Amino acid sequence: MENKFFKKDYSLLYDVIYSKKNYKAETNLISQIIKKFHSPNVNILDIGCGTGEHTLELLKKGYKVTGIDLSNEMLKIAKKKLLSNKLFSNNLFNLNAYNVNKLDVKFNVILMMFNVIGYLKDVQFFFEKLKDCLEPNALIFFDYWSEKAVKKNPPKTTKKDFLLKEFKATRISKGKIIKNKVKVDLILNIIKQNKTKSFDETHNVGFYDIRSLVKTIQKFGYKKKNIGLSKFEKLINSKSQWEKFCLLKYEKKNIPSTKS
C-alpha cells in the first residue's frame, strides 16, 4: 500500500525527532485507565502505530496488541524493535484505518496517538466502520489538535537541529491554516561526510472542536469519558499547546454499518 508521507528518510529520523517523548509514562497512564473498565486480558489495536513505541511498551506490560500503519518503512522499524525485545512481531500490518475489519478481530481497546485522527479524511465514516470491530464497552484513546488552540496560536515556521554520531539533521516545519486543516510542509536536511541530502513531505492535518466531533459520532454509541484528561495532556503537550486528549467508551452492542 503506497503512502504519501512518513517515507523512508523521515521514518529513519522519526525516533530521533521524538526521542524526548515519554512513551512509558503515556502507556502507564493508558494501562491505569484500562484497568478501571476492564480486566488485564484485553485485546488492543494501535492504529497508526508508527515505529512501534506505544505497541512495544504495552506488549511489555503483557497486553495483547495489534498494530497497523500506512507506512511500510515505519512498520519495518517497529518489527525490528519487537524482535530485539524478543516479542512477537507478526501482529503488525500495513493497513488503512478504514479497513480494520479486515483483521477479523474484535477489540476492547483502540489507541490512536500522535494525532492519527487528524489524518482521517472522513472521521464520521471511520467511527461508523470502527464499531463493527469493537467489543461492548470498548475504550478508544486518541489525541487531537484543538481547533481553539490552533486558532489562538497559529502555526509558525520552526527549525530544529539533531546531532548524532553518524550525521547531523535539520528539520524545518512550515505550517498554514487552510479551512479546518493545517498544511505542514516539512523539509529535512541530512548532512553526512560533508554531503547534504534534502527531502520534503507535506502533511494536511485536521483540527477539531471536540464537542462537535463527539456529537457527530454519539449516534454510533460513543460516549466521552472525562478520566485522565489533564494528566495525559501534560504528557503529550508541546509548546504550541495544540494537543488534547480524548477517551471514548463504546456503549452499544455491535450493529452492522450502513456503508461498506
Image (spheres, grey):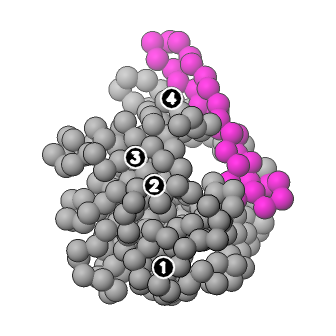
Residue holding disc 1: 254
Residue holding disc 3: 93
**What's the residue type where badge 2 is placed?**
Lys
Q: Position of residue 34 (x, y in %)?
A: 33, 79
Q: Is residue 44 above or below residue 254?
A: above
**What's the residue type where badge 4 is placed?**
Asp
Q: Earlier in the sequence, mark 4 or mark 1?
A: 4
Marks 4 and 3, how far apart at CA: 20 Å
Q: Magenta region, mostly helix, strand or loop?
A: strand
Q: Specify few, some or many for label 1: CA neighbours under 10 Å numbering under 14, 14-19, or 20 or more.
A: some
Q: Earlier in the sequence, mark 2 or mark 4?
A: 4
Q: How many marks?
A: 4
Marks 1 and 3, how far apart at CA: 24 Å
Q: Look at the numbered discs 4 and 1 and tell me whether their residues touch, using CB distance below 8 Å.
A: no
Q: Position of residue 194 (x, y in %)?
A: 50, 12
User: Residue 9: which numbered mark, if any?
Assistant: 4
Q: Look at the numbered discs 1 and 3 and tell me whether their residues touch, using CB distance below 8 Å.
A: no
Q: Nearer the viewer, residue 245 or 99?
A: 99
- Quarter holding residue 65: bottom left
Q: Earlier in the sequence, mark 1 or mark 3?
A: 3
Q: Earlier in the sequence, mark 2 or mark 1?
A: 2
Residue holding disc 2: 102
Q: Residue at x 26, y 63 (%)?
A: 64
Give the quarter of the figure containing the C terminus. Answer: bottom right
